[in-house]
Image: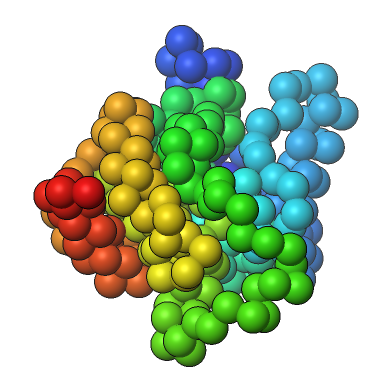
């Protein structure tokens, strides 16, 4: 398979960027998208050119680092998958593929396709954890959890923090990410003691990071590689109102 690649090249956040055209030939259709970029970078290095910077780690759809915009879609055209789970057989031979970084003011470009998503880390640090003693691992089996709540908590916990929801949203909202983290812990008894302070702190940090507001276009859910439901956003709003107006 042969492809024309239009890749966003940007030296750093302070520099201007532009789309640069490359050609790559004899691509195996079983090659992953990141493997294809590896081959391209090998060719660039051999020609004495700067390789394309992009983030990756697990290459198993777990870590969320491989975030990039491919042909106008976060993580590319394949639903419920990350970029590293995307294979070249999902494209047509001879196709032009446009590859860009996630574009959001709160995700500044580091270089080329790599963006700084540490804003998510700061939101988690603000309250996305259980800070009270909940016993040892074996003690969890002694705490009853209603099955439907356990199922909802596990669905929310599937969020890998890739940022596709932010990139897909016209407002660059982080509501789906924050709601998944708040839902995960608010539905479990271990998260109950810090339930109110958690949602207040995380929403405050989200606002301080400059993310936009949610206007219910559902683009976040549509592009989420883990299928996180916007129902979590409704739960986040309820949790926030409950904590804000509580007299405790």
Residue 3 image point, x, y percent: 62, 54
Residue at the far top: name it: 14
Nearer to the camera, 178 or 87: 178
| Coloring scheme used | rainbow
Residue 106, picture quadrant:
top left
> Taking 155 as reference, is 117 above or below it?
above
Q: Residue at left 66%, top 53%? A: 63
> Taking 136 as reference, is 72 above or below it?
above
Q: Residue at left 42%, top 81%? A: 149
Residue 88 image point, x, y percent: 66, 65
> Taking 180 as reference, is 103 above or below it?
above
4 relative to 41 in the view: left or right: left
Residue at the far front: name it: 248
Residue 104 image point, x, y percent: 36, 35
66 relative to 209 in the view: left or right: right
Q: Quadrant of the N terminus?
A: bottom right
Residue 81 image point, x, y percent: 56, 68
Q: Residue at left 43%, top 55%? A: 193
Residue at the far bottom: name it: 147
Answer whether residue 98 is visible to the viewer in this image.
no
Q: Residue at left 47%, top 70%? A: 188
């Amino acid at each position: 398979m042969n492809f024309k690649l239009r890749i966003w090249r940007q030296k750093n956040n302070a520099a201007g960027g532009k789309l640069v055209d490359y050609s790559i030939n004899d691509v195996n259709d079983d090659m992953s998208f990141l493997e294809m970029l590896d081959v391209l970078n090998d060719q660039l290095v051999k020609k004495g050119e700067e390789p394309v910077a992009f983030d990756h780690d697990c290459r198993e759809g777990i870590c969320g680092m491989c975030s990039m915009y491919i042909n106008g879609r976060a993580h590319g055209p394949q639903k419920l998958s990350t970029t590293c789970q995307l294979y070249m057989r999902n494209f047509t031979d001879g196709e032009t593929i446009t590859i860009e970084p996630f574009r959001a003011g709160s995700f500044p470009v580091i270089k080329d396709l790599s963006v700084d998503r540490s804003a998510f880390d700061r939101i988690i640090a603000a309250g996305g954890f259980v800070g009270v003693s909940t016993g040892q691992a074996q003690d969890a089996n002694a705490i009853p959890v209603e099955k439907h709540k356990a199922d909802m908590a596990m669905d929310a916990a599937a969020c890998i923090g890739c940022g596709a929801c932010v990139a897909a949203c016209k407002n660059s909202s982080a509501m789906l990410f924050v709601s998944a983290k708040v839902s995960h812990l608010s539905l479990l008894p271990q998260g109950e003691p810090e339930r109110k302070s958690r949602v207040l702190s995380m929403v405050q940090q989200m606002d301080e990071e400059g993310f936009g507001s949610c206007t219910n276009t559902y683009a976040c859910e549509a592009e989420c590689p883990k299928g996180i439901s916007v129902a979590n956003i409704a739960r986040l709003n309820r949790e926030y109102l409950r904590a804000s107006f509580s007299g405790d």
